[in-house]
Image (tube, coloured by chain):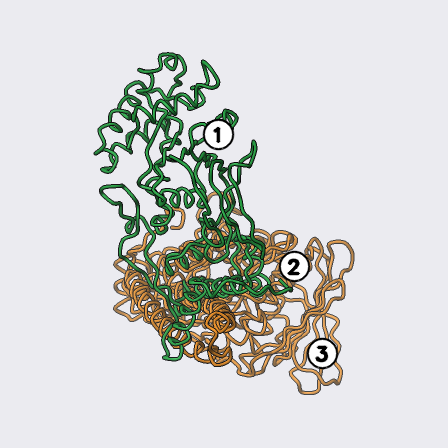
Amino acid sequence: MATKEKNPDKGVENGKEVEPKSAEEIFEEFKEHSVAEFFTKNKQMLGFSGKVRSLTTVIHEYVTNGLDACEEAGILPDITVKITSVQEEHYLVKVADNGPGIPLDHIGRALGMMLSGTKFHRYMQQRGQQGIGATGCTMFAQLTSGKPIHIRSSTGNGKVYECNVSVNIKTNMPNVSDVQEYEGEFRGVEVMAEFADVKYDRSEYSPLEYLKRTAIANPHAEISFIDPEGRKVRFPRVSESLPERPHEVQPHPLGLESHTLYELMRISPARKVSSFMTTELVRVTSSKVDELRNVIPQFDFDMSPKDVTWEDARRLVAGFKKVKWVAPSAEGLRPIGNDQIEISLRSLLSPEYLSVRSRPPKVYKGGVPFIVEAAISYGGKSGARTEAGSVGGEIMRFSNRSPLLFDAGGCAITKAVKGIEWKRYGISDFDTIPVTVFVNILSAFVPYTGAGKQSIASEPEVVDEIKFAVMDVARDLQRYIAGKVREETRATKRKAIIRYIQLLSEHLPMLANTGNKEDLEKKLTVLVFDKFKADEAEEDKKEKKTRVLMEEEGNESDSDSDGKIEFDEEDM
Amino acid sequence: MAEKKKSDEKTTVAHDKLVTMGREMVQEINMSESPSFLTPVRSRSNIKSDPDTGALYLGGSKETRTFVHVSQAKKFMQTVAIASKLKSFLEQGLHTSIRGLYYQLKFSIGEDVDEELFSEQSESNPLIEDLEASLDLKREDFNLSTDRKGVVAGNMTIKDKFGGDESIIDAAKQGRSGWMIPSDVDNGMEFVDIDADYVLVVEKDALWQRLNEDKFWKKNNCILITPKGQASRGTRRLIRKLADKKIPIYVFTDCDAWGWYIYWAIKTGSMNLAYLSKSLATPEARFIGVTMSDIEHYDFLKKLTITAKEVDIKRAQEMLSYPWISKHKQWVDELNIVLKTKKKIEQDALQGQRLTFVGDYVKEKITSGEILP
């Protein structure tokens, strides 16, 4: 996280040599050089690193925008994605949605200007949040293929427009050209963009895998995909219920990072930092501002928010952490919901067994609310398949419904799942069992490890909560597997005993010179199955007892969650 | 099995017992009870030994075999199937081996027959033992034959009814090979005439052949038997029956663990077959030798001892701990010599000086009465 805060800063400071500057100077410089520098310096962090990953990031940004737009407008999303090969490591990407569309006079700002997306100054639990994504793609297209992106959009009023959009790297101003308007029946946005120096493959980091997981987290979306070889994949809509619209919430001081705070203040109409804080941040009262004055006495709370520097913003964020805050409300959180998760995992993985749990909201960092949803899917198409054809445990990570494909190793979800003692749940080796573990973390302030937003920071409370959620579903699975084994044993036993009854009834009359086969068989069957039923009931009773014991044990560890569970130093 | 031979025997005891067992099971089922039968516990805990003779026998503990029990159902069903097969063998007057029985069952039961149970020698088969012990009969009584082992020669004639024929066996006219003792010496077998002062049981076939060539049994009016090592059920049963005729039994083995075991198995029965001891053990049997104390009388044997092995030493120690052995001073002395010298001696050693000495040795021992109880 430290890097994330530093980098935008560096763009400014490293450009200059020595002397301290006035806020105006810095801001002017930022305006002139920041966009290009910001992008090139932060390309990696934004997900544009590696040929495969860059392409997946592009798909991610566009699909995310489409889904968010549809949901906000209350439309069931239809997303189509097509990747066509132009030449080697050079592709044409086409992503279309059926959302509300973007009016022509907004398109430049939406796709050709950094840090100015409609989402930026509103805080809600949404997939994209920084307003970097789509414009980043525009810039990435420009830098790799030399071409602007092409847009077709309509708000559904019968008028369709098409245009090219690019970013003026010098001024960070959008450049909209070749505008054509015509009559047509279309609603939504269709983006066509060319990217070079990227690569399509079918690995676990591919756009295909990304779309598959997006479909899992969004059962209400219809997603279709055509890959460069012309193969069509369709992830059908399996639920008609549109997620509840996210509540807009103002940012909470603890959820802010310095560059976001800086940007918020830059566009704030407030006259003083103190009034910006009490009006545009949640849970900040004037007495809290006074507390802050004591914590960071060198900071001038009466200056205009527009005069605040990156360094000021950082000092302020550091100050926030030293003050006790009333926790932000968890109201804005919008889980996918057990039913919806179940529908989509069933439809996609056709599992033999599935358990879904969502846990009540918890807080991390002393006050940021979050919710963990977890599911475990066993059998069917569950699990990751290697090229050699073997199946192993798979972890599907999501945050705010958005799949996380990259940086798995450092992610709190991976750590939590791998840290579970699977043997206790009847799974001898997680890496050889057809199991898919699904984890979705919901928060208006997901603690990502970087601006690439592919990995969740190992906040102890978050890791614990993920662990407990997964342990809940793992316990369900264990019960299922144990029951299945028991049922199989019983069925085998029953089958065998029926055969023994037949054979005994056949031989006994020959031995005794009396008795009738059918009659003996009937009587023996009654005798045997009465006994079996009693035996099985006894067995079930025993099993139930151990289950209760186990659950009690589980709850105990649950109550330990207040920091008692220890992590390896690496994890921290 | 297609041609049915009418058994010329009257309904045998074995047949009756089998049918009765079946009837009781049918009755139990009709009374809504699990079919079952009682059988003596054959585990070591229930094996007792007669303090006087050392004869092993089963104590009074019994256990129930029952069908309505997860772990017993299969075995119970197989036991009943075996019983019904044995009954039909008896009715047909035909004999077969355990292996033959296995294929009979496989034909009618199929994959539910537990091959494991039938793959080993008869004595390891717990289901048949259940029937034997439960009904107080030997498997031979069920027309189940076991491997033959053991040879006899001497003045003894036997009537043998078998396969519908009847023949008279004269054990004095069997030339160099002797008469091979059948697995069943009870059913269809009858002594016609016996003229013998004693029975000599010689552990090793080689020694038996030596004595047979010397006409030892003819010259000394005895019956000469070799079990060829450990005595088979048929051989033990024959010895028991000869003892019943009040003929003294002398056993002549190596002086080592194996030889002693052969002697004591004939005399007291074995753990495995404790449930049959009554009809197999011969507590009257006496031990001729070879003994370590023989060295005192036959000087040349001194050179012919060999080093005792660990198993011999251990066995000697074990025997000293059995009360029915340790109460005999002669055995205690004998075993102590073995433990002290760590030597043993084979019966073959008696030929070391002169081949025909073996017969002289036996004669001298019997005449002098220097035999062990």
Give the CA separation, mark 3 to mark 1: 118 Å
Give the labeled residue for mark 2: A55
**Chain A drawing hue:** orange
In what element is the residue under mark 1? helix
Give the CA separation, mark 1 to mark 2: 96 Å
Along the line of sight, which residue is nearer the eye, B233 or A247? Answer: B233
Indicate the quadrant where residue B233 lies. top left
A353 versus B208 height, above or below: below
Q: Mark 3: few, some, or many residues within 10 Å (few <14, many ≥20)?
A: some
Checking the image for residue A161, the label placed there is: 3
Q: Mark 1: few, some, or many residues within 10 Å (few <14, many ≥20)?
A: many
Judge whether residue A379 can be spotted in this image. yes
Rendered green, the chain in question is B
Specify whether A218 is left or right of A192.
left
Along the line of sight, which residue is nearer the eye, A132 or B123? Answer: B123
In what element is the residue under mark 2? helix
Give the CA separation, mark 3 to mark 2: 26 Å
Q: Mark 2: few, some, or many residues within 10 Å (few <14, many ≥20)?
A: many
Checking the image for residue A457, the label placed there is: none
Judge whether residue A115 can be spotted in this image. no
Q: Which callout, 3 or 2, points to the residue nearer the camera?
A: 2
Q: Chain of mark 3?
A: A
Q: Chain of mark 1?
A: B
Indicate the quadrant where residue A442 lies. bottom left
Specify whether B321 is left or right of B168.
left
Residue type pointed to by label 3:
Tyr
Checking the image for residue B208, the label placed there is: 1
**Mark positioned earlier in the residue sequence (3 or 2):** 2
Residue type pointed to by label 1:
Trp
Specify whether A318 is left or right of A44.
left
Where is residue A480? Give x, y as percent.
44, 68
